[in-house]
Amino acid sequence: MKMRHLQALPLALSVLLAACAGVPPQAPHRPLAEPRPPSVTVDAPVVTPIDAGGPVTPATTGVWDQLRGSFAMADCDADPGVLAWAHRYTRNPQQFESQLQTVLPQLVYVQQVAAQYDVAGEFVLLPWIESHFRPVLARRNLPAGMWQIMPVTAGSMGLRVDGHYDGRLDVPAAANAVMKLLKQYHDQFQDWRVTDYAYNAGEFAVKKLIQQHGMPADEPVIPKWPVRKVTREHLTKLLAMACVVREPARFNVSLPTLPSEQHLVKVAMPHSMPIALAADHAGMSVDALKDLNAAFRSDTIDASASSYLLLPVSHARQFRDALLDQANSSTVSASLAGNLVGETSTAATAASTPAATRTGQKTHTVQNGESLWQIARRYAVSTTQLQRWNHLHGNTLQPGQVLRISSH
């Protein structure tokens, strides 16, 4: 998004910029307390969630009902342009459903952040309008991230952007920064439509429009202010996506559901580590982990830049277990290395001792709670080797399962 260059205000005023657009210096808003999104904290060797009640994950079947209930603007029939864009988004229902399913974890996470700031539900769909929720990488001075935020705007929003880390691509950090900004705009203008205009065109431009034309009437729903076409269309598109969520059957689409295990949570990083190692800990591919944590520009998770990773619930548990195992293995004797402290017993040790088959092949019997990563670490092999030797197509193991731990 681009903005007109406007007359600068006195230097005594601070800078607050609208997302994706540079705005001349403005008077600062009163900072809002930033609530913490649902998190899973790993502080080896103790594991405790940041929130006393544990990770917050909306009911699988209630995601869309919750979103509809938080809508605050007009419905499908308020403007012909809204309906036209809704049909345009869903002209290929199968493709639309597939795209929505792919980005649903991020959408649900943003929904939780928006609810914490009491921001209208339509803005949960804002990344769809900006980027289809894609982690758009930065190029020169262009906007980046699923919110399409300009570098200079990121600085005013408190997001770090440098050669090692780009906060615009940090889903939790950017979502909190954007929702805080939208909340501030609404507190100031008391109109969610004007809030969207401010996000797209800039706060200063909106203030000038109000001075010249007054606040817009409730109708038409798309204010007839002399703004650029892209600004008017931005609001139209936002209402159109909300329209599809309101009445999916009207557009021959079905809204996907998200299993609780795929909900995203923050996992605290006790120290920096290579992305490849973090992916192995989490039982994910490197590409999948990078997609969710695209803010890191190198092949290292820099804990000094961001103290957490964003992971699906199921992989967050595996990552936590791997960190615990790593921490505990450094404090126990070599004879007990690879077993969690307090969970070993004579029987368990005997049961998990490698057995030699008649051909001399070594095996390991999986114990309750053991992960593929833990077993691989114990025998100084890789998880990939274990998967190949045992014809495994994932990381799921069953207690009592016998694994080959060598190729012969």
Image: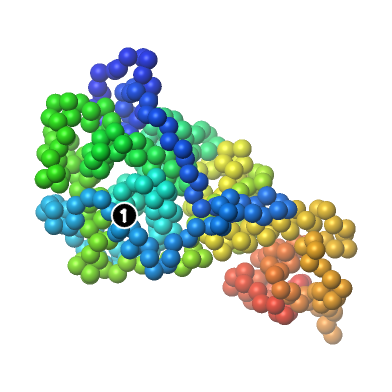
Look at 43% across and 36% down and name the residue there: 32
Q: State which quadrant residue 230 falls in.
A: top left
Q: Is residue 197 above or below residue 268?
A: above
Q: Residue 22, how many percent across, how many down? A: 33, 29
Look at 66% across and 65% down and name the residue there: 384
Look at 70% across and 70% down and name the residue there: 369
**Residue type of the residue flagged with mark 1:** Ser
Q: Residue furthest bottom?
A: 358
The residue indicated by pointer 1 is 70
Q: In which quadrant is the C terminus drawn?
A: bottom right
Q: State which quadrant residue 284 falls in.
A: bottom right
- Position of 48 with respect to 2 (left or right) is right
Q: Is residue 30 above or below residue 312?
A: above
Q: Is residue 325 above or below residue 206?
A: below
- Position of 72 with respect to 221 (left or right) is right
Secondary structure of the residue carrying tag 1 is loop
Residue 288 at least partly seen: no
Q: In which quadrant is the N terminus drawn?
A: top left
